[in-house]
């Protein structure tokens, strides 16, 4: 039984699963939307929302205590692959969502993929 199990395994061992999630979240922040399977989108959606919340807290705290913003940037950089994406997260995405209490992403169903009939979705950031 999978009681209280938080992560989806996605038929991968821990190393490839971590790399996949990191790459997908990085590309979501870089392009604003990604086209992927529903299972992968559901697996990264929570992580992306937590990073946006972290960036919002870092930007808000940076106004009074710059050390807190540096700490938040380092935490985000540890979870993303690209320093430019971290900069975009803190300079564009987080300030645009300051008045939004949550729900920063949207999943739109696109149908099924040819070949294996996997459900495909468009995961995108909600407009700021």
Image (tube, rainbow, N blue to C red):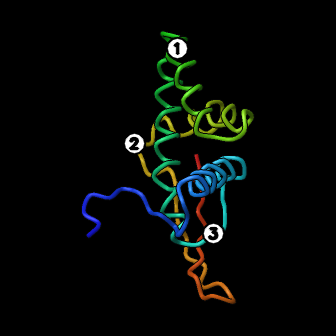
Quadrant, the N terminus: bottom left
Query: In the figure, is residue 91 to the left or right of 66?
Result: right
Query: Distance of mark 1 from mark 2, alpha carbons?
Result: 19 Å
Question: Label 2 to label 3, Cα distance in Å?
Answer: 26 Å
Along the line of sight, which residue is nearer the eye, 116 or 12? 12
Binning the other alpha carbons within 10 Å of mark 2 as few (below 14), some (14 to 19) or many (20 upward) gives few
Instruction: Answer with mark 3 or mark 1, whichever residue precedes in sequence.
Output: 3
Of mark 1 and mark 2, the one earlier in the sequence is: 1
Instruction: Reply above or below: 72 against 5.
Output: above
Residue beneath disc 2: 101
Work out whether residue 10 or residue 32 is closer to the camera in this orientation and state it. Answer: 10
Residue at x 52% of width, y 67% of height: 10
Disc 3 target residue: 36
Give the secondary structure at mark 2.
loop
The picture places residue 123, in percent across and down from the top left corner, at: 58, 63
Mark 2 vs mark 3, foreground winner is 3
The residue wearing badge 1 is: 63
């Amino acid at each position: 039984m999978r009681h209280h199990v938080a992560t989806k395994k996605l038929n991968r061992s821990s190393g490839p699963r971590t790399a996949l999630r990191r790459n997908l979240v990085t590309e979501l922040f870089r392009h604003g939307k990604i086209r992927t399977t529903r299972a992968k989108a559901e697996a990264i959606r929570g992580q992306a929302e937590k990073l946006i919340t972290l960036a919002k807290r870092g930007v808000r705290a940076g106004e009074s205590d710059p050390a807190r913003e540096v700490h938040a940037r380092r935490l985000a950089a540890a979870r993303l692959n690209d320093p430019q994406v971290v900069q975009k997260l803190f300079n564009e995405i987080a300030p645009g969502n300051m008045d939004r209490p949550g729900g920063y992403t949207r999943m739109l169903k696109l149908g099924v993929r040819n070949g294996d009939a996997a459900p495909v979705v468009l995961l995108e950031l909600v407009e700021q």
